Amino acid sequence: MKNVDFSDLLKILEQEETNIKQNQEKRGQSQKEIPLALPSLSTNHLQTQEEKISGFNIKEFENLLRNQLLTEHRQSLKWDRPNLSVTELLSCERKICYSRLKYEIDESSEFRFAYLYLINKVGQEVHSIVQKLCKFDETEKTVIDPKYKVKGRVDAIKGNTLVEIKTMDSDKWTGTYKPEHYNQGIIYSHILNTVYNYKINNITIVYVFRDLRTIHVRDLEPNSNVAESFLKKALLIHHCIDTKNIPPVEFNKNLEECTFCSYKKYCQKNEQNQKHIDLL
């Protein structure tokens, strides 16, 4: 991608890591210079003492993180959302309808992975750093397609290039981009070109690993046909929401997100009912 040197950003991140290590080494040397007279204690006794005097309760912290996720979920149910988000278009049609029609979920079993809240916050901070350091023309641009009632927010635009910034774990990297990330850029670029008269001809996906030591960049071409297929999906979803109907079960077959879906029980019930009808 022209005019955006992501190597400079990587150097800054590496320098920060070096500074942290140097400070840790200095603190370690200082501690070695001051001998401490400690009583002779067994390993088990040390562990017990540490548990008693600890000023940080991990379980309590995890509960606080989970409460934050639950609060955000409950708040989202109160929003007036006439438009579908681009992120929703990349998800299961049935899941979107269940959510928009406010089907109840079992909150006691939800958001068990409390650290998702931290992961989200780290991702937001990485976005902010990249957007601040790189000389983009626009950042956080809101786009709306009134025909399909779809809304989204573009990470950055530079000339005729749309930039999507993503964070991920290094062990999840397969050497190439994720299709859902590319599709997101495809939809954004199509809306920019057809509604806002932009001339986007390149999609750049910037992957920043969460170890903050590696960045991968991929340049891809927009695809209007793919974008239109997703936007037409929005019309189906809007119709289902307006008529308070859920799309057929086959719409979400073999999707990875089904495993951890909050509305999985509703799909399973509908599928069982469908099998019963077929047997009649």
Image: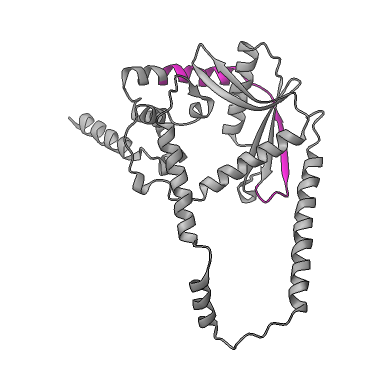
Magenta stretch holds residue 215: yes
User: In the picture, which quadrant includes the N terminus?
Assistant: top right
Q: Is residue 204 above or below residue 114?
A: above
Residue found at the far left of this picture: 280
Residue 143 visible:
yes
Q: Is residue 132 above or below residue 212?
A: above
Q: Give how far across and how far down residue 130 sits, in percent.
A: 72, 37
Q: Give how far across and how far down residue 48 sits, in percent.
A: 49, 77
Residue 254 visible:
no
Q: Residue at x 71, y 15 (%)?
A: 199
Q: Which residues are magenta?
A: 210-237
In this orientation, which residue lies closer to the viewer: 72 or 123?
72
Marks counted in the figure total 0
Q: Is residue 63 above or below residue 53?
A: above
**Residue 19 placement: quadrant:** bottom right
**Residue 225 placement: quadrant:** top right
User: In the picture, which quadrant includes the C terminus?
Assistant: top left
Q: Residue at x 60, y 17 (%)?
A: 191
In this orientation, which residue lies closer to the viewer: 29 or 266?
29
Q: Residue at x 79, y 32 (%)?
A: 4
